[in-house]
Amino acid sequence: MTVMFLERSVNRFKRHSCAWGQGLVLPAVVLLALCVSSAIRAEKSGWDAPVMLRDGGSVMPLKVYKRNGRVHVLYLRQVKKGKIQLESLVSSDLKKWKKGLQEDLGLLTVLPAVSSRGDSLDVITVDIKQEIFHLEIDLNSGESNERPIYREQSANIDNRFRVSLIGHKNRMLFLFAEKISKTLGRAHLLESKDGGRTWRKVVMPDRKFSRKNYGEGRPILFTTRALMHFFVTDSEKGSHLVHYIRPLNGADWQKLNTNLRGSKDKLVPLGGTYNGKHALVLYGHQTQVFAATSSDGGFSWTKASKFNMAAHFFFTAVAASRNGFALMGVRKTKKKAAEFVVRLSGDGGKTWRDTGFRAGPKSDLIMMPVGSFSRNGRELFLIYLNIKQLGKEGELKMYFRRFRSGD
């Protein structure tokens, strides 16, 4: 199936097309990465760059984490007839890699969401019939179990929205979106309190959001010790975010009056996380990124730190450790190129430093950062995609980087 999509530049949109799956429509730079006839390789440019894999096909990174002394890299690969497969690579020394998981996910319309809970890996998928499935994989035995959990009555799940999954102990939260119109969407939430055996739909605040620039920002959901936090752009005022909270064991959402402002332009949520002590929320607009933190579980927030990226900034990701946070993102360098930027905070998000990490030649386009800290917070693992030439067949590279605290 040929899918049309838009590549967002600073001043205009440009149309491209490619064949991928069955109706899987994604933000342009995401879909473009999956369209490229590819080989995966590592290149040395400052940080550790172990060789991961050499294989054909289209790939996309999903998750990286360290478990029992071994690093696991999860990614999607398109196989025959548009079907999508979940695969993993595992290494104990970042030099020799072995293939791990290999699960057939079938034909999808939305990129799956992945989360890990102890010895379980949870994957939520949406098939071409708009039915949502939960795939649970036992990381010790490798056994898997898949069950249908929900079917959206409107049958209009937004296949451009990057869904997310939060998992902790027996609780899981799955955020997805409904397409209301060409320009507007509405968030929906599914919750399980018994490890995925049963699910129910959580009533969400009736707040519409723009579908135009998913690469720059979208509604976000994360949890602190006792609360769910939902951030979305104020569609009326536009210059600040709307923050809703809901007790994990409660029923009603409450809108908080926050000081999360910082620009006359329309701000969008970029990411949020919690490290056990501090909550972090990122938001911004084009070249400006703001980071605000909370030490009381998200009831009150500090005045936001401002990063002027001096170039268009999108596809932001955050990672948390008990010692601090990492901000990862793609910064547009010129018309058809971008670079990967990493900033760190070791004091709960109060101050940030640029690691000096710059990935990719100036002619390359970099996208879709994925990262996580090791449990002790001393290592940060990064994956991202890099393509040589926009809109043309070429080489797709998956890089892997690691650094230790103090680098």
Image (tube, grey):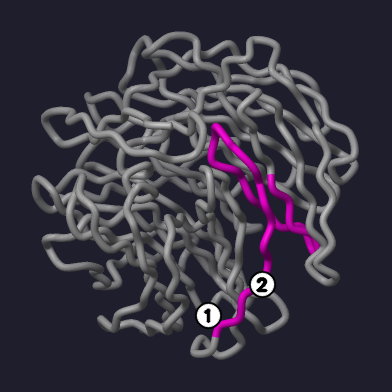
Magenta residues, start to end: 97-123
Q: Give the vertical position of 79 relative to 391 (above or below).
A: below
223, 337: nearer the viewer: 337
For marks 1 and 2, the one nearer the N-term is 2
Q: Which residue is mark 1?
A: 378
Q: Is residue 56 left or right of residue 194?
A: left
Residue at the disc numbered 2: 100
Element assignment for label 1:
loop
Locate residue 190, reporting x and y percent: 73, 29
In which image quadrant can residue 182 be found? top left
Q: Is residue 93 left or right of residue 145?
A: left
Count of numbered tags:
2
The front one of 199 and 16 is: 16
Q: Is residue 208 left or right of residue 392?
A: right
Q: Label 2's element? A: strand
The type of residue carrying mark 1 is: Arg
Magenta: main secondary structure equals strand
Tell me the quarter of the image containing the C terminus: bottom left
Q: Position of residue 116 (x, y in %)?
A: 71, 57
Query: Compared to 292, does 185 lie above or below?
Result: above
